[in-house]
Amino acid sequence: MLQPFASSDPFTIGVELEVQVVNTHDYNLTKAATELLNRVRERDFAGAIKPETTEGMIELATGVCENFDQARNQLLVLRDTLVRAADFLNVGVCGGGTNSFQNWYDQRSDGRERSEYLMGLYGALYQQFTIFGQHVHVGCPDADSALVLLHSLSRYVPHFIALAASSPYVQGTDTQFQCARLNSVAPFPLSGQAPFVTRWSEFEQYFERMEGTGLVHSLKDFYWDIRPSPGYGTIEIRVMDTPLRVEWAAAIAAYIQSVARYLLVDEPVHLSERDYEVYRANRFMACRFGLDGNCLNPETGHRGPIRAEILATLEAIAGHARILGAEEGLEIIRRTVTDGLSDAMWLRRIYRVHDSLHEVARQQCQIWRGAQIPE
């Protein structure tokens, strides 16, 4: 049965980051999540450090945050707490949407009931799901508004993918994608986009039909790019790779937060199911080419570069960013989109210099713990 949609403060945010746990020999994934969780169990911090899918993954989750600065500060504390525990155990932790050279067939369930169920259901597909993403929750004033926001944000999904893209390497190979992580999500039968309904009563009816098939037991069984989280009173945007730095993750969350307020307050988007006719193509362009990809506006038919679209959006949402306290985060976005390297571009640059994915992963661990990204 679907939970009632909880009350939440509109446009508050919560950030979740799935983090790699690696050894300090060749920087492949290692089975240390349980030991890390035991080390941090008695520590005092806002948010949570939790298990995720396999023993080579950890999830960092903020509490409910009002603005960029609060989200960044909570993520920094969570990061530092995890890094100290990892140092004690002589393992590494890092961001990035994929581990560049881990073998999917080496991955095992972490033993939790849900992990065992999913491993039994999806088999090798679930083992290949050892990927690392950033999820952002946005508080919504009510259930119907949540669905309107969910579908309005679909036009901005290429922005979110391109900004966070950090998974060019899979199984030791350059995939030619900026974000290859989402290629591991697409094969799941309940992935993609949510059904086009904008009233919660209609969504409840949809869920009841799906539940009646036996295919789903909760909303977590849907691997949608954006899905409602009624227990929190939020929608959850799930398309981003885990960035290499928590500061960048917080900036992306601030961008999403500001776009969300712009969409619900100014109502610039005229929703139509036809938006999804070009959705998969736009999503592909963002995954393949990142900020240099081109996307088609489903309403106007205009095709333009994602980089330019983000810069135009920053202008449109500036007033909302001021109200939300997101200006510093959006300035980080602007500088990177205008002059900087994306995470995927930086990973490729390091590989070209050192010709070693192991060295790339070693430097990812250094960047994660606060070292400056070399230009």
Image (cartoon, rainbow, N blue to C red):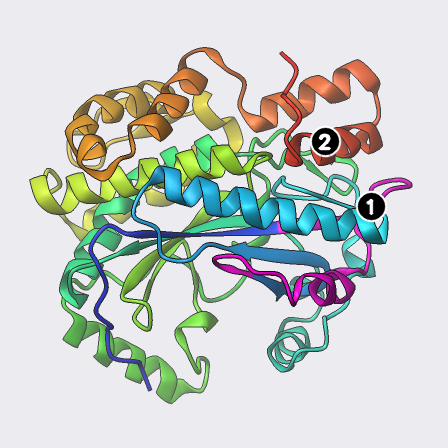
Q: Is residue 351 above or below residue 118?
A: above
**In what element is the residue under mark 1?**
loop
Instruction: Indicate whether residue 350 is drawn in magenta.
Output: no
Q: Position of residue 143 (x, y in %)?
A: 18, 67
Residue at 59%, 40% in the rendered image: 180
Q: Amino acid at mark 1?
A: Asn
* SS label for mark 2: helix
Please state, as top left, top right, bottom left or bottom right, where the C terminus lies in the image: top right
Q: At x 64% / y 74%, what residue is drawn?
A: 115
Badge 1: few (under 14), some or many (20 or more) residues near its Cα, within 10 Å?
A: many
Q: Position of residue 369 (x, y in %)?
A: 67, 36
* Residue with the mark numbered 1: 28
Is residue 20 rendered magenta in the image? yes
Q: Residues within 10 Å of mark 2 (few under 14, many from 20)?
A: some
**Which dot, 1 or 2, sits closer to the camera?**
2
Q: Quadrant of residue 112?
A: bottom right
The amino acid type of the residue labelled 2 equals: Gln
Q: Would residue 29 be found to the left or right of residue 242 on screen?
A: right
Q: Residue furthest right?
A: 25
Residue lying at 19% horizontally and 64% vertically, measured from the top left: 197
Q: CA distance from mark 1 to mark 2?
A: 15 Å
Residue at horizontal 67 percent and vertical 61 percent from the top = 40
Is residue 327 placed above or below 153 in the rendered structure? above
Residue 183 seen in the figure = no
Between discs 1 and 2, the one toward the N terminus: 1
Q: Which residues make up the magenta segment?
A: 19-48
Question: Where is residue 337 drawn, in percent x and y?
Answer: 42, 19
| Quarter where residue 198 is shown | bottom left
**Which residue is labeled 2 in the image?**
366
Q: Nearer the viewer, residue 286 or 231?
A: 231
The answer to which of 322 and 133 lies nearer the viewer is: 322
